[in-house]
Amino acid sequence: MTHLRLGVNIDHVATVREARGGAYPDPVRAARLAEAAGADGITAHLREDRRHISDDDINRLSRELNIPLNLEMAATDEMHIIALNAKPRAACIVPEKREEITTEGGLDAARQHNHLSPIVRSLGAAGIRVSLFVEPARDQLDAAKSLGAPVVELHTGAYANASGAEQDRILARLTEAAAYGESIGLEIHAGHGLTFDNVKPIAAIPQIRELNIGHFLVGEAIFIGLDASIRRMRALMDEARA
């Protein structure tokens, strides 16, 4: 099978920083540690309310990283301009609500087609690889293809929160969506809520090319360190692909 890339989301290093203000802990330092530990890319979500990652973080990451930066962003005029100026390797368009604690579901690309179209087109023309964070449903994959987005990231939150037969059913939907998405020419990524305990069935889906994982890795780093947390996740992903 092809190498499964690991994108490490460093948002919640910035969450800890913002709990007291100041400059510590530095998410850019975390990104460098993640790279040394085997991350293939870094993901950071610049939210409208700037609750964790800041504009300065994005500027520094854009300048200082040796591995690709994936900017998670809402489909707003402000974020569109920021992305064009920062020129990350990739931009993942996600839904965003101010009242949510974290991203609660996938983007409705089918219903928002007309709103998303000029943003996807503009980012792509600037050389930024666009992905859409969507539910594992054919209408969303068809919409991504219609919009010209080369990548989709399948939302795995429902899978991560389920157990038993329900988790198996959601895994089957993710597996079918990954196969269908690849069949229509999309590159398939996945992420949200993945842990040491639940990552292997997702990592084993052959069409998935990249997993983006953050909150769990940063949380586990409290106990075993960021390097060990990332290396363990990398090893589990590789075992699933073996």
Image (tube, grey):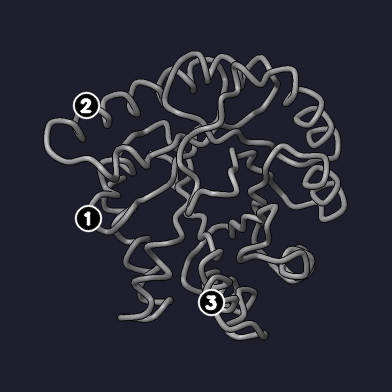
How far apart in space, not on screen, are marks 2 and 3 (Cα)? 36 Å
Q: Are marks 2 and 3 in contact (CB under 8 Å)?
A: no
For the point 56% across and 75% down, the residue is 30
Q: Quadrant of residue 225?
A: bottom left
Q: Return the mark for residue 169.
A: 2
Where residue 159 appears, as percent x and y from the top left, is 29, 38
Report how far apart the C-alphas of labels 2 and 1 lie in the structure.
Answer: 17 Å
**Residue marked by disc 3:** 33
Name the front one of labels 3 and 1: 1
* Lateral position of residue 68 relative to residue 160, left or right: right
Asked if disc 2 and disc 1 are in contact, CB closer than 8 Å, the reply is: no
Residue type pointed to by label 3: Leu
Could you say whether the residue bearing mark 1 is in a helix, strand or loop?
loop
- The residue type indicated by label 2 comes to Arg
Q: Residue furthest left?
A: 164
Q: Which mark is residue 197?
A: 1
Secondary structure under tag 2 reads: helix
Residue under the image location 42 percent in, 77 percent down: 227
Neighbours of disc 1 within 10 Å: few (<14), some (14-19), many (20+): few
Name the side, left or right, on which 118 lies relative to 54: right
Q: Earlier in the sequence, mark 2 or mark 3?
A: 3
Asked if residue 191 is positioned above or below residue 61 in the image, the reply reads above
Q: Identify residue type, mark 1.
A: Asp
> What residue sits 43% from the left and 70% below the top?
218
